[in-house]
């Protein structure tokens, strides 16, 4: 949403976040230690960072931000929808880190008294790829994490976690946690499951998505779409408008009307979900009204 950034800044400076959580892990190595921060406790959830202590052959440190939710509590996906605040992860103050990519597990659509939103009702882990500047240098991680968790009330959580990796070694148990977290991530589009077309409809000021689905799947299994639209062009959660004769279409309303001198453009992230299977793709919306995606290629 357009007001999302300012809303988050306001929340982070408000009294709701008066108790900022800080964990500094600078302890000597022992057999019981791994590259993990302590759990940071808050109402409804606790948070920690677990990471490999040494990068792989490509200079990548694999890590996770682990979120342990109490029963009945929920948190949000990268683009929640009409309500909720997406998680924020900031590793910019880390040393010997030049790039960060956070991966988001597949969400579910949640309906409650606050509205409908994309999020998580169970404990989860966000996988993180940390690109080191020099694999042989010491790495010091500083992670600023902001989450919203909700039950009958919503509580913002702010955590500042530090890990000096030269003081740690990663245990097999921690490595298993890191690797297992990646099994919950969407995959690349496939020939039998992908976004066939995304089309902007000027008359209704909406984007319609047409899907390619497997030839056979259980009749009670309904496909779902989750999107993250360009910041300047926020869109509603897509709704199913057609499912017949092998054609499945969803529609998402654009909240502002694009103008001729300011066309609908920017990255549009799309996640398709069908039961336990999910794929993801990103379309670069251009100046023409139709963008197509077919099995690994995008044209706009």
Image (cartoon, rainbow, N blue to C red):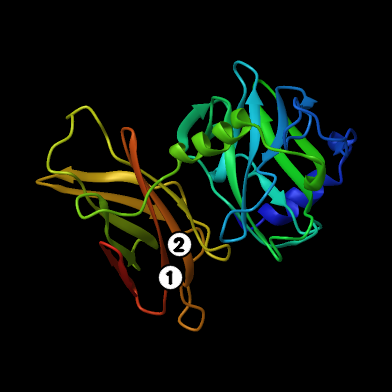
Taking the spot 35% from the left edge, 78% from the top edge, the residue there is 288
270 or 117: nearer the eye? Answer: 270
In the figure, residue 239 lies in which quadrant?
A: top left
Q: Are marks 2 and 1 in contact (CB under 8 Å)?
A: yes
Residue 228 % position (x, y)? 50, 54
> In the displayed structure, would residue 293 be above or below residue 183?
below
- Farthest front residue in view: 31
Q: Report if residue 117 is visible in the image.
A: no
Task: Determine whether the residue tagged by mark 1 lies in a helix, strand or loop.
Answer: strand
- Mark number displayed over residue 284: 1
Q: Is residue 281 visible?
A: yes
Residue located at (78% from left, 50% from top): 141
In the rendered view, does 187 fall on the left or right side of 114?
left
Nearer to me, 108 or 185? 185
Q: Nearer the viewer, residue 228 or 187?
A: 187
Classify 136 as above or below 114: below
Q: Position of residue 252 (x, y in %)?
A: 39, 53
């Amino acid at each position: 949403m357009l007001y999302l950034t300012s809303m988050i800044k306001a929340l982070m400076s408000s009294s709701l976040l008066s108790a900022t959580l800080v964990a500094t892990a600078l302890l000597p190595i022992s057999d019981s230690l791994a590259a993990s921060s302590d759990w940071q406790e808050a109402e409804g959830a606790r948070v920690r960072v677990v990471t490999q202590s040494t990068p792989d052959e490509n200079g990548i440190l694999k890590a996770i931000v682990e979120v342990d939710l109490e029963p009945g509590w929920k948190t949000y996906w990268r683009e929640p929808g009409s309500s909720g605040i997406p998680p924020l992860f900031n590793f910019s103050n880390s040393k010997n880190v030049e790039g960060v990519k956070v991966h988001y597990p597949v969400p579910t659509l949640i309906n409650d008294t606050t509205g409908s939103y994309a999020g998580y009702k169970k404990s989860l882990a966000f996988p993180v790829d940390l690109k080191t500047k020099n694999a042989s240098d010491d790495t010091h991680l500083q992670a600023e994490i902001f989450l919203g968790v909700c039950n009958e009330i919503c509580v913002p959580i702010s955590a500042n976690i530090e890990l000096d990796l030269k003081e740690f070694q990663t245990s097999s148990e921690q490595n298993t946690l890191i690797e297992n977290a990646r099994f919950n991530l969407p995959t690349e589009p496939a020939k039998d499951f992908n976004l066939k077309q995304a089309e902007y409809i000027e008359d209704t000021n909406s984007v319609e998505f047409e899907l390619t689905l497997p030839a056979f799947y259980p009749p009670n299994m309904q496909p779902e779409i989750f999107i993250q639209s360009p910041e300047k062009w926020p869109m509603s959660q897509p709704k199913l408008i057609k499912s017949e004769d092998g054609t499945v279409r969803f529609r998402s309303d654009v909240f502002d009307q694009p103008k001729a001198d300011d066309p609908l453009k920017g990255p549009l992230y799309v996640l398709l979900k069908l039961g336990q299977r999910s794929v993801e793709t990103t379309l670069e919306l251009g100046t023409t009204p139709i963008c197509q995606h077919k099995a690994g290629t995008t044209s706009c």
